[in-house]
Amino acid sequence: MNKVSPELYKAISSVKNTKEINAAFPSDELGINLSGDSRQLIKVLSETFSQSEADFAETILLHALSETLKVMPDVLSEKEFNKLEERIIKELGLAAYLSLRPVFPFAQGIQLPNFAEVSSQKGIILGKWVTSDEMIVINDPVTDKSLFSYSKGIQPELSVDGFTWQWVGTNVKPVYLQPVNSNNFVSTIDSADVLFIEGVGYFYREDEYLDDLKFSAYSNIEDKIIQHKEFTDLFSVIGNEQSTYSIQPKTDAFKMALQKSCGEWEIGKVRIQIFSLHNVMISPDNNHV
Amino acid sequence: MSSRFLKSYETSFQANIIDSLRKLSKNEDYESFNLIMTEEQAGLSKIFSESLGVTARSYIQTVMGAELARMVNIKQRNASLEEQNNFYSEVIIAPLKAEQELDGLVANYLPINLSQLQNALLIKQAKLKLGLRFNNFRAYRLANFDGKPTIEIVLYIDNEASKNFRSAWLGVKGLPLKSLSFCSVSSLSEHVNQVSIFANIFDLNCMHVGQRGLRYER
């Protein structure tokens, strides 16, 4: 991760406690006063990068926000910083916090994931993430049967991607799944990383870089329903019992989708939950912040 | 793509910006600007500003002023390749998914900082090409066969071709620079051996790693 620039560091550390109070904020638009030079810079730089001034300003704001989080531990006391983290998670959700890409120390971090992807010789398995005093247990998300268990005493090793642990002969990727909140099925499934189909199991987005809406089964699915006509009418199914299943919604599925609740849809007789996936970066080292 | 954008590829960034900056008057008057943000950004600004004990307006004015000042500083002092690359990466943002895709690269490709690059030809090429078209550089080191010098790789986004990482330059000491293109990051992982073989062949300049194997060009 990049070091915070001295300019921003100085600016944030020097912001004075003015005891002013935010009047009627947040809203999606805020009038701010910039020095004449800064205002001109937005104009010149946005033109150079062929972006609108609004987009360019948003880019700068976004960068400043995630950099601010890195400066905060030096500006606030530990207690205040913990409170700040808690407040962001409580008010904006864990996914919003994870998008700032902080790295959590071990003891704090392991409280955050709700699922994990484990790759072993059997393929990629999705499990629920459960912690107890001594252990981290990965349970089958459907049957709740324990699939893997790791002692907290044995430290995992972090692989180069910064997300995945090498742990007792497996690769473990702690993740946070959040229901996609949109009342439009097309946009919901477009931003889906993981699908849960009731009675079948969990599927992951196959190639996020193509616009394909193709989802592959994790290796721990129940495949009873997948060959039924009720299902194949709505989804094209590729694969068989010997290989991995991939599914892709058909046009009819889009026509028939009805929203039940946030992230939950009913398509004919098929019930489906739609999630976005966020990697949780946890350092195996407890002293790392 | 707009013709303006294509044109801006052709003119150097440096000349463009520095010249425009010179024309700026040292004007200390304040001007208003309407900042449009998402609900999440507004929420974060509110929480950060309240932790600091100021209004969201003061907080945002301060950090945006600092960010802009930093951008000017990068251009005005003799910034390193790494600093310049970070600057471009902030403004021409690689899609998060393209970044995550890189995380799946096998560990044979050891990520290094741009400042750790040793190959003079590769550094020269990277400096020369960095701009609106080629940016978001990522440097890697790849072990070579016994006793041979390390292979250094700079992956980049060619904005004219794709928003993903699909191209790279390869440098090996004593050999001319090579270009590599690939259809996906996973194919780059899969064909890691062929990539290092290619890097060592003197008279091959380009290689493409496709879904159905490899293609070389002189």
Image: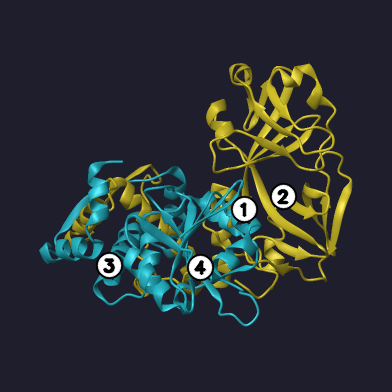
Chain colours: A yellow, B cyan
- Quadrant in which residue B119 is drawn: bottom left
Chain containing mark 3: B
- What residue did someone put label 3 on? B69
Chain containing mark 2: A
Circle 1 or circle 2, nearest the eye? 1
Residue B186 on image: x %, y %: 62, 53
Tell me, yes or no, whether dots 2 and 3 are on the same chain: no
**A288 to the left or right of B6:** right
Which secondary structure lies at badge 1?
helix
Calculate the distance from the C-alpha at mark 1 to the C-alpha at mark 4: 16 Å
Residue A21, visible in the rendered structure: no
Amino acid type of disc 3? Ala
**A264 to the left or right of B119:** right
Calculate the distance from the C-alpha at mark 3 to the C-alpha at mark 1: 39 Å
**Which numbered disc covers residue B186?**
1
- What residue did someone put label 2 on? A114
Residue B37 on image: x %, y %: 38, 45
- What residue did someone put label 4 on? B153
